[in-house]
């Protein structure tokens, strides 16, 4: 990574913070190389400055003009307004990276009204601790070097894979939203622990280690998850009893529907934006 690169985040919410936190921990960027802007929430920018020592982009024009990499990290619904506010200040030498769910590189180029290279990324909030699972796809104008640069950037916050752009919808439904599914599972386990009378602190520790242990088993043994599940499930035992309830509640179907629905939502968000942009023409 060229250590002179400067980065501006347009949108300073959860995802921007997760990336900033991860990038700084890896020390490939100094806080002064990173600046942030949002629409109106100055308290949020102040918090990021106080927490990470990064720069607040008080002058949007200056911050955009001097950046090598512009990261779009607002919500998809805000992208028209967000890009309109910066497009006069961007130039073809810069690289735009978008983490927006659903929004195509084509739509972003249309909104920029300039032929800037755009790389689309779908990280997740585990970026905060350098554990994101990120998928990348280069838009038409982005070259190999710019994709490699983007890869290096996201490797500071976890693992990176490259996919065809249309597959980013599925990635979003699976691993972009994925941490929330796991957190929901933990919430459910915590509620259950309370109902079966375990002390909160003890339950929390046990649940956490159970999740970490299972994840590490998946990573370090080559066994299929179904085999690992069977190894826990003694015939006529407690796991079998517990799993029978999950089956009764169609747990697997629920999970599959959940991921498909999130994927469809990404498609929907992208299509709504494409429509909105074509209405602007
Ligand atoms: N959260 C996640 O787990 C993931 C999110 N993403 C993507 O990241 C993007 C951001 O999500 P998330 O961080 O959760 O969202 P947040 O709501 O936490 O943050 C959005 C930020 O965008 C800012 N913003 C809104 N409008 C504009 C504008 N016109 N110009 C500049 N900034 C603006 C907001 O500022 P203000 O408060 O002032 O309006 C806010 O700081 C989304 O597109 C999402 O799809 C991708 C992967 C994972
Ligand atoms: O919920 C969302 O729309 C974003 C995209 C992936 C994770 N969070």
Image: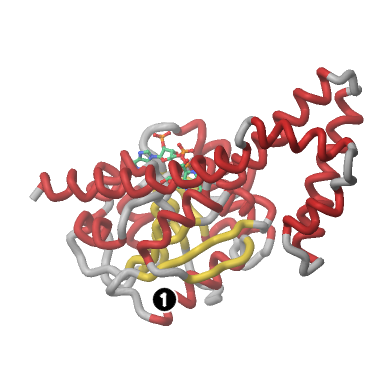
- Residue 80: give x, y in percent of width and height: 25, 45
Where is 279 relative to 93, above or below?
A: above
Q: Where is residue 170 in the image (x, y as percent from the top left)?
A: 45, 55
* Residue at x 36% of width, y 79% of height: 143
Residue 63 drawn at (x, y percent)? 38, 55
In the rendered image, residue 138, in percent from the top left (x then y), is placed at 37, 70
- Which residue occupies the extreme front position in the image? 236
Front residue (pair 13, 186)? 186
> Residue placed at 41% from the left, 81% from the top?
144
Foreground of the two, 174 or 129: 174
* Left or right: 274 in relation to 160: left
Q: Viewer-proximal residue, 267 or 248? A: 248
Task: Name above or below for residue 220 compared with residue 32.
Answer: below
Left or right, residue 97 beside residue 126: left
- Where 249 sits versus 230, above or below? above
Q: Tell me, what colour scheme is on the image? A: secondary structure
Q: Which residue is drawn at 41% across and 54% down?
A: 169
* Extreme-left residue of the structure: 281
Number of numbered labels in the structure image? 1
Q: Name the residue under label 1.
A: 146
User: What element does badge 1 sit on?
Assistant: helix
Q: In which quarter of the image is residue 140?
A: bottom left
- Residue at left 26%, top 67%? 91
Q: 163 and 143: which one is in front?
A: 163
Q: Which of the 4 quarters of the picture holds residue 246?
A: top right
- The answer to which image quadrant residue 67 occupies is bottom left
Say whether residue 281 is visible.
yes
Task: Characterize the local packing of mark 1: few (<14), some (14-19) or many (20 or more) Cα atoms within 10 angstroms.
Answer: some
Q: In this view, does 32 lie to the left or right of 277?
A: right
Look at the image and tell me in which quarter the N terminus lies.
bottom right
Is residue 58 in view from this perspective?
A: no
């Amino acid at each position: 990574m060229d250590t002179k690169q400067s980065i501006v985040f347009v949108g300073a919410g959860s995802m921007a913070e997760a990336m900033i936190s991860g990038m700084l921990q890896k020390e490939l960027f100094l806080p002064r190389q990173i600046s942030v802007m949002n629409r109106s929430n100055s308290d949020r920018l102040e918090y990021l400055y106080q927490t990470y020592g990064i720069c607040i982009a008080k002058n949007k024009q200056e911050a955009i003009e001097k950046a090598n990499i512009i990261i779009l990290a607002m919500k998809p619904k805000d992208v028209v307004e967000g890009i309109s506010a910066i497009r006069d200040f961007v130039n073809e030498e810069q690289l735009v990276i978008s983490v927006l769910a659903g929004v195509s590189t084509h739509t972003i180029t249309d909104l920029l009204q300039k032929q800037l290279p755009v790389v689309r990324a779908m990280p997740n909030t585990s970026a905060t601790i350098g554990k994101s699972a990120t998928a990348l796809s280069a838009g038409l104008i982005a070259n190999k070097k710019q994709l490699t640069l983007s890869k290096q950037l996201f490797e500071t916050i976890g693992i990176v894979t490259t996919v065809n752009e249309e597959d980013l919808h599925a990635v979003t439904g699976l691993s972009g939203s994925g941490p929330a599914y796991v957190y929901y599972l933990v919430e459910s386990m915590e509620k259950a622990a309370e109902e079966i009378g375990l002390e909160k602190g003890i339950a929390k520790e046990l649940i956490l280690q159970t999740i970490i242990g299972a994840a590490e088993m998946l990573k370090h043994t080559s066994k299929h998850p179904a085999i690992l599940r069977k190894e826990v499930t003694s015939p006529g035992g407690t796991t079998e009893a517990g799993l029978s309830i999950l089956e009764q509640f169609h747990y697997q179907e629920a999970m599959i529907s959940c991921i498909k629905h999130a994927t469809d939502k990404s498609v929907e968000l992208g299509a709504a934006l494409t429509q909105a942009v074509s209405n602007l023409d």
